[in-house]
Amino acid sequence: MATQQSPAPPGPPGPTPDECSIRVISRVRPLNSSEEKVGSKFILKFPTDDSININGKLFIFDKILQPNVSQEDVYNTTAKTIVADVLAGYNGTIFAYGQTSSGKTHTMEGVLGDSKMQGIIPRIIADIFNYIYQMDENLEFHIKVSYFEIYMDKIKDLLDISKTNLSVHEDKNKVTYVKGATERFVSSPEEVMEAIEEGKSNRHVAVTNMNEHSSRSHSVFLINVKQEHLETEKKLNGKLYLVDLAGSEKVSKTGAEGAVLDEAKNINKSLSALGNVISALADGNKSHVPYRDSKLTRILQESLGGNARTTIVICCSPASYNESETKSTLMFGQRAKTIKNSVKVNEELTADEWKRRYEKEKEKNGKLKTWVQKLEAELKAWRSGQSVTSEEQIDMKASITSIESEGLEVAPTIMESSIGNLSTITEAEKTQWDGERIKLYAQLDEKVRFV
């Protein structure tokens, strides 16, 4: 078992986050027997591999998976690359979204134990261990899994049924987690699948008019992969969330009554909260994103607009009977596709790496401070009426380029416009120079807080 690491000392920042869009894959299932029985028509068209048309309305996604697609192709398209990402220290999320009976559980789980019909989750588990078996023998891995469901807006641990009302908390880095959820260490695909089978037996399902085994909860399977290089002592930590959402429902279609009706209301409420989060992020309104409106959106906070490579599989019925629900699902996917996440490697630096980065930042900021001091000295000379020879003047263009290469921003205002003509600067320009100087110092202060 991995030993608990003490908190890292204050030091230089980690890797710069990269911005990436959420990937949205649309999967269309065939007409099912009940739809065929009532004479429902196949109303979807596929003009290209990445577009789908519903009665003249065109939607474009990263990929369209048509009804004849195999489970293996679904996995290769949606999830295969995320294995390498997680083992490289990134966070990842894959979840399926759509109305009830649209194929979400078939996509995420499939038929467990069937090599041809199994879904994304068992395939990704096998791939993670295959990757590990082929990696550097000096890498030591610690893998643990958690499995819980959100039922009636309460979080229930599927690996320990005595835990029925877990809460969502934030760690010191403002990252959400489910406090008290069972974390089971695993060392083989078989052990992971045993945990999944155990959890599935504890999950809430029910029979409705549209689905013989309708999921009455959102399930979250979390895989946490920690690795350490025994020689360099470099540590990486990648988390993978695999989410099977319950489907949105129209009670008039599902025939829900009693307890099943109450479940449907809670499912629709949490999915509505998810839609509101997607809409807020798509509108660029990051000042207030309603993550706290439901347990589901709190758990998915890092996956939507945060630090994770996220793929959403929107599952659709092609039947005319479900036209309005399919349009709603496609519109959800269209909004989600515009969301940007900021991803970075989750690494724990060794003492040598901390020292190297510290010295690098210290040297860089020393150069920047020297440049600002020279700039102030020249400006002071001009203000006092002294002349500064061309040899003594700072090459502004080269300096700006040099400063920006150090990761600071210099606004292209007076610094560029006054190059070569400092002797004629006005009072207004002097004031603007002061503003630039204050801004630059503020950036320097931010860069050297840890020095």
Image: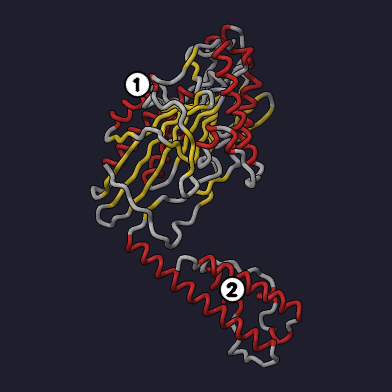
Could you tell me which residue is drawn at 36 percent across and 44 percent down?
Answer: 87
Give the camera-side residue of 313 and 280: 280
Could you tell me which residue is drawn at 70 percent across and 84 percent down?
Answer: 421
The location of residue 80, given as percent across then percent down, is: 41, 37
- Dot 2 or dot 1, earlier in sequence: 1
C-alpha gap between disc 2 and disc 1: 62 Å
Q: Which residue lies furthest to the top in this view?
A: 37
Identify the image quadrant of the N terminus. Answer: top left
The location of residue 250, given as percent across then percent down, is: 62, 17
Give the camera-side residue of 447 and 323: 447
The residue to which callout 1 is attached is 114
Mark 2–mark 1 CB contact (< 8 Å): no
Tell me, yes or no, if residue 78 can be seen here.
Answer: yes
The residue to which callout 2 is attached is 400
Q: Residues within 10 Å of mark 2 (few under 14, many from 20)?
A: some
Disc 1 is placed on an element classified as loop
Amino acid under disc 2: Ile
Could you tell me which residue is drawn at 53 percent across and 45 percent down?
Answer: 306
